[in-house]
Image (tube, grey):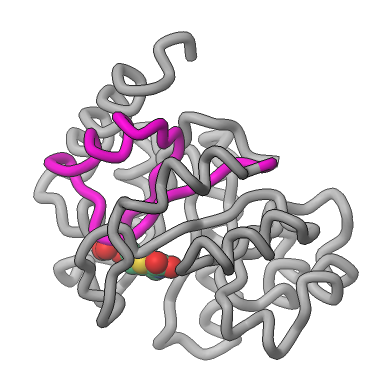
């Protein structure tokens, strides 16, 4: 399970202004990100495993949750805390199969891009649900906006992580609607001062929604 009030960093070597992923993740952890997802679409399996092993150790040191994107077998092999599955992934490997691979102790998250996908995910054996892209993002060629935010929060029976184009300027718009967890690539990976940016984002989350944590 993931804790609420989490700042979730998704890696992206291609979106890190040439900086090394381990360096970027270290700076993000120094600022206090709670969850790190290794999402490196350009890397082959053996390289993902090598990078993943480094990130597993790094996240452990900071007591942060470490999630592998797309591949439950890699998550299992490197003993990550869990796996994140996209809608395309779950066409190939169902959530129930992924659960058998990673086991009941591990975290499974799934991406959803509409209220109807969210509703289905809500009934499935996942530990959190990502919903987005809520704003314009370079990663996707569409965005779904914030209209469904309150609706999904109302029906959710597990933590919801909002994603897509979120940054220091627009995060409040989500927090005001009740969001507790937000995920980002570029607002963190492309920040000039990653640690400072993360500290400020965490402060905003705390003020916006999670005053008691
Ligand atoms: N998944 P940025 S949006 C990886 O909506 C990802 O499922 C999304 O990057 C989804 O914070 C997204 O730079 C990209 O917009 C997030």
> 45 and 124: which one is in front?
124
Residue 41 image offset from top left, x and y in percent: 43, 83
Give, as a single range, the part of the protein colored magenta: 157-185
* In this rendering, position of residue 135 left or right of residue 68: left
Q: Is residue 163 above or below residue 209?
A: below
Residue 4 image offset from top left, x and y in percent: 54, 31
Q: Is residue 172 above or below residue 10?
A: above
Residue in the picture at 68% in, 65% down: 120
- Where's ligand 1: which quadrant? bottom left
Quarter residue 184 falls in: bottom left
Quadrant (top left/top right/bottom left/bottom right) for the N terminus: top right
> 140 and 143: which one is in front?
143
| 182 drawn magenta | yes
Identify the residue at the far top of this view: 212
Residue in the picture at 63% in, 39% down: 2
Q: Is residue 133 above or below residue 138?
A: above
| 47 drawn magenta | no
Residue 45 image offset from top left, x and y in percent: 59, 87
Quarter residue 168 falls in: top left
Quarter residue 164 falls in: bottom left
Residue in the picture at 43% in, 76% down: 40
């Amino acid at each position: 399970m993931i804790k609420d009030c989490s700042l979730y960093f998704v890696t992206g070597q291609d979106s890190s202004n040439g900086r090394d992923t381990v360096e970027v993740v270290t700076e993000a952890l120094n600022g206090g990100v709670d969850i790190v997802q290794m999402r490196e679409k350009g890397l082959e399996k053996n390289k993902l495993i090598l990078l993943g092993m480094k990130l597993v150790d790094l996240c452990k040191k900071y007591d942060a949750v470490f999630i592998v994107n797309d591949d439950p077998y890699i998550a299992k092999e490197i003993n990550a805390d869990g796996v994140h599955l996209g809608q395309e992934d779950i066409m190939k490997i169902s959530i129930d199969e992924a659960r058998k691979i990673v086991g009941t102790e591990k975290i499974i998250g799934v991406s959803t891009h509409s209220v109807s996908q969210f509703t289905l995910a809500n009934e499935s054996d996942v530990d959190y649900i990502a919903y987005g892209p809520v704003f314009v993002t370079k990663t996707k060629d569409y965005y779904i906006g914030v209209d469904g935010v309150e609706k999904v929060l109302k029906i959710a029976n597990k933590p919801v992580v909002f994603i897509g184009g979120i940054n220091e300027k627009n995060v409040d718009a989500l927090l005001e609607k009740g969001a507790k967890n937000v995920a980002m690539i570029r607002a963190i990976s492309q920040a000039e001062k990653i640690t400072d940016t993360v500290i400020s984002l965490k402060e905003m989350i705390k003020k916006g929604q999670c005053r008691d944590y």
